[in-house]
Amino acid sequence: MNAELEYSIMQHRASELRRAAAEHRRVREVAKGSRSERRHRSIFAKLLAS
C-alpha cells in the first residue's frame, strides 16, 4: 500500500473513532442524568407514602 492511501485510511479510522467516542460520551451523560432523576423520584415516592 502506498503511503498516501495508508494515511487517508488512518485519517478515516481516526474520524470514526472520534465520532464513536462523542456518541459514547453523549449516551453516558444522558444515562447519568436519568440515574439522578430516578433517585429523586424514589425519594419523593417515599415522602409521599409516609
Image (cartoon, helix red, strand yellow):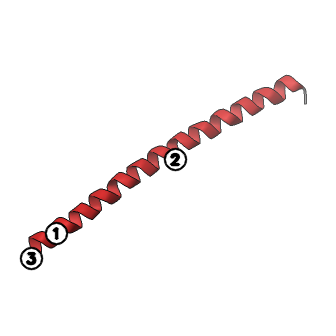
Position of residue 43 relative to residue 30, above or below, is below
Instruction: Check disc 3: other Cα within 10 Å, few if <14, some if 14-19, many if 20+.
Output: few
**Rendered residue at 76%/31% (across/down):** 9
Q: On the image, numbered disc 1 is attached to which residue?
A: 45
Instruction: Check disc 1: other Cα within 10 Å, few if <14, some if 14-19, many if 20+.
Output: few
Kind of residue at badge 1: Ala
Kind of residue at badge 3: Ser
User: Looking at the rendering, which quadrant does residue 37 occupy?
Assistant: bottom left
Position of residue 26 relative to residue 44, above or below, is above
User: Looking at the rendering, which quadrant does residue 15 occupy?
Assistant: top right
Q: CA distance from mark 1 to mark 3?
A: 9 Å
Of callouts 1 and 3, the N-terminal one:
1
Residue 23 locus on image (x, y percent):
51, 42
Of callouts 3 and 2, the N-terminal one:
2
Residue 49 locus on image (x, y percent):
10, 75
Can you name the residue that lies furthest to the top here? 4
Q: CA distance from mark 3 to mark 2?
A: 40 Å
Position of residue 32 relative to residue 47, above or below, is above
**Rendered residue at 57%/37% (across/down):** 19
* Label 1 close to label 2 by CB (< 8 Å): no
Of callouts 1 and 2, the N-terminal one:
2
Kind of residue at badge 2: His
Residue 10 locus on image (x, y percent):
76, 33
Q: Secondary structure under badge 3? A: loop
Q: On the image, numbered disc 3 is attached to which residue?
A: 50
- Screen quadrant of the N terminus: top right
Q: On the image, numbered disc 2 is attached to which residue?
A: 24
Q: Secondary structure under badge 1? A: helix
**Rendered residue at 84%/23% (across/down):** 4
Instruction: Check disc 2: other Cα within 10 Å, few if <14, some if 14-19, many if 20+.
Output: few
**Rendered residue at 10%/70% (across/down):** 48
Q: Secondary structure under badge 2? A: helix
